[in-house]
């Protein structure tokens, strides 16, 4: 019944070994994870790692024998003080069910339960080895706090309507509705594993919290929260680098979140490997202080400040649609920044330089003020330079196109490139990014070796379709549209790419095409907003070959591929 997902992340971090502009080493550990240490020039020797599910140490618990259940019709508060199986039905208008056993497993079968607590917790699990809540087939169950309840300032007091100090499992095929008018919906101070059921949570603060771990393996989970939708906030990793706590894991089922803060927040790692996750959040869609990984399933962030954020972001499969008012994918911060402070100076490698003819910085932020600060100069990568930085729409017949010239946007000495091992790795999956800020932003490195990524980036020249200390595209297909003032292009060692910089703004809804010398269309994309530049990289692009660019059916120029 309580099973572990078959898909694990063996070899998931191998793609980082080929990061451009940085030396990386990988070391296998006893737990099966792959530790990554980046930037050999730095004194920092620790990095972030991507955990497998088995590394979490989540234990299976004994199956629920429903034939041995003790039937309990609820009318008033009840305390369960003996391990065993209990079938609960009935209603409590102003009270709770308390579980307090010295040892053993307690199984609660909810079969038509309605409990309104006179304070915070409708079900309060004080002590047990583990508790399993089974939602009986066809049953509807509701848990809520009183409208007059107030949030306790005592950290030892229950902080959620369904509250547990033991490992908590939720399974079954029935439904559970949790309403929290003053605090959290469901909280386990240990681990919380959801294996089934149709669960809806409305919470004034956080929706669902598994302090050590939150794992969704199956079922339907719908959350409307004033704070974080789902979180795992054990920050033990700050003092113990081997800790596997503070992890949110989604390997099955359907999760839909509306949140006033982050959709999902995890201290150590956040993984989607088979679930369908949809998020509308006022802050980050998915946020990890360590690794954020997507291997399979789907991630749809329909509203966010930044859609995906992590110190390490690994996209190896699945599908995703990311909408953000700032960065679509942001690689920044991390628990190592809190645990230790390191400084380093990054050596600028020799390379080309310069902006496209007629270019300026487009009225954007000074590069020194920008995250991942970069300046025109020698180094890997490339800056296309704006052709006037015009964000107004220009008639296609008046647009001219030029390539990004020089390829010289190199990493400058900056605290964001501090050797802490931050990176974005894309090895698979299909991803669409609609960002008002940077489409892909890494205060570190980006390495793409597979998958399909389409970026509808910013019109503002203070941001860029792709922004990184360095990045390479050695496989897959990257299509990135956006502003030209801070344009950064694929660096040394990348596959063929075409970078076209437009002299004026291409209107939203315009079809931009690249055709080869034989007239074959190698790329076609429709702009989502005013666009000044296009980056296209794929195995079909031949370095040195010339490609014709058309906008809304009008030929605007030719560009030689790099």
Image (cartoon, rainbow, N blue to C red):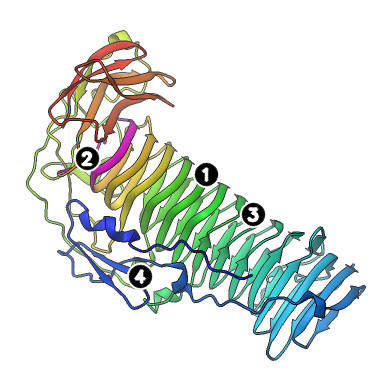
Q: Quick check: can you spot residue 385?
A: no
Q: In which quarter of the image is the C terminus?
A: top left
| Label 2 or label 3, whichever comes before in sequence order | 3
| Label 1 or label 4, whichever comes before in sequence order | 4
Q: Quick check: can you spot residue 68?
A: yes
Q: In screen coordinates, is 112 left or right of 439?
A: right
- Image coordinates of residue 432 in percent, x first then y, are 43, 38
How crowded pointer 3 is (Cα within 10 Å; few <14, some 14-19, many 20+) is rated as many
Q: In screen coordinates, is 497 left or right of 333?
A: left
Is 342 or 224 nearer to us in this picture? 224
Image depth: mark 2 or mark 4 in front? 4
| Label 3 or label 4, whichever comes before in sequence order | 4
Give the residue at mark 4: 33
How crowded pointer 2 is (Cα within 10 Å; few <14, some 14-19, many 20+) is rated as many
| Label 1 or label 3, whichever comes before in sequence order | 3
Number of dots carrying numbers? 4
| Image disc number at residue 490 | 2
- Image coordinates of residue 101 in percent, x first then y, are 73, 88
Q: Residue at position x 62%, y 78% from top?
A: 61
Secondary-structure class at tag 2: loop
How crowded pointer 1 is (Cα within 10 Å; few <14, some 14-19, many 20+) is rated as many
Q: What stretch is highlighted in magenta?
A: 470-492
Give the residue at mark 3: 226
| Image disc number at residue 300 | 1
Secondary-structure class at tag 3: loop
């Amino acid at each position: 019944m309580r099973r572990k997902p078959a898909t694990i992340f063996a070899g998931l971090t191998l793609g980082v070994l080929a990061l451009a502009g940085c030396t990386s080493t990988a070391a296998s550990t006893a737990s099966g994870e792959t530790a990554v240490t980046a930037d050999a020039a730095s004194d920092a020797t620790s990095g972030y790692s991507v955990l497998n599910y088995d590394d979490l140490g989540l234990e299976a618990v004994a199956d629920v024998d429903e034939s041995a259940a003790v039937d309990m019709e609820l009318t008033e508060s009840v305390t369960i003080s003996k391990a065993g199986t209990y079938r609960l039905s009935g209603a409590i208008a102003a009270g709770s069910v308390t579980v307090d056993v010295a040892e053993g497993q307690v199984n609660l079968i909810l079969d038509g339960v309605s409990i309104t607590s006179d304070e915070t917790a409708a079900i309060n699990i004080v002590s047990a080895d583990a508790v399993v809540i089974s939602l009986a087939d066809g049953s509807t169950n509701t848990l809520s706090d009183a409208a007059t309840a107030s949030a306790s300032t005592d950290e030892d007091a229950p902080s959620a309507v369904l509250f547990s100090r033991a490992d908590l499992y939720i399974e079954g095929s029935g439904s559970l509705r949790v309403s929290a008018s003053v605090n959290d919906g469901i909280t386990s101070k240990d681990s919380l594993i959801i294996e089934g059921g149709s669960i809806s949570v409305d919470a004034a603060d956080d929706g669902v919290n598994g302090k050590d771990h939150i794992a969704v393996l199956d079922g339907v989970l719908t959350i409307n929260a004033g704070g974080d939708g789902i979180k795992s906030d054990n920050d033990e990793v700050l003092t113990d680098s081997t800790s596997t706590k503070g992890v949110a894991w989604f390997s099955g089922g359907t999760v839909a979140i509306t949140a006033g803060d982050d959709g999902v927040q995890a201290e150590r790692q956040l993984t989607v490997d088979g679930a369908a996750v949809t998020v509308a959040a006022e802050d980050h869609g998915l946020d990890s202080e360590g690794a954020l990984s997507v291997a399979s399933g789907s991630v749809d962030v329909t509203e966010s400040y930044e859609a995906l954020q992590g110190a390490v972001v690994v996209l190896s499969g699945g599908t995703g649609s990311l909408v953000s008012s700032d960065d679509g994918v942001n690689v920044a911060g991390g628990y190592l920044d809190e645990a230790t402070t390191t400084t380093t100076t990054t050596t600028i490698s020799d390379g080309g330089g310069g902006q496209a003819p007629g270019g300026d910085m487009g009225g954007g932020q000074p590069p020194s003020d920008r995250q991942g600060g970069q300046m025109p100069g020698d180094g890997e990568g490339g800056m296309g330079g704006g052709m006037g930085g015009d964000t107004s729409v220009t008639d296609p017949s008046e647009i001219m196109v030029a390539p990004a010239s020089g390829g010289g946007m190199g990493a400058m000495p900056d605290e964001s490139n501090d050797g802490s091992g931050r990176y974005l790795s894309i090895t698979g999956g299909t991803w669409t990014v609609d960002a008002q800020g940077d489409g892909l932003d890494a205060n570190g490195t980006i390495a793409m070796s597979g998958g399909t990524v389409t970026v509808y980036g910013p019109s503002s020249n203070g941001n860029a379709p792709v922004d990184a200390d360095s990045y390479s595209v050695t496989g897959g297909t990257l299509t990135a549209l956006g502003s030209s003032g801070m344009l950064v292009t694929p660096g040394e060692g990348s596959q063929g790419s075409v970078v076209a910089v437009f002299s004026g703004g291409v209107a939203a809804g315009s079809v931009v095409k690249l055709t080869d010398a034989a007239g074959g269309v190698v790329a076609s994309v429709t702009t989502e907003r005013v666009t000044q530049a296009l980056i296209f990289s794929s195995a079909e692009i031949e370095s040195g070959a010339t490609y014709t660019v058309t906008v809304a059916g009008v030929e605007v120029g030719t560009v030689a591929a790099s």
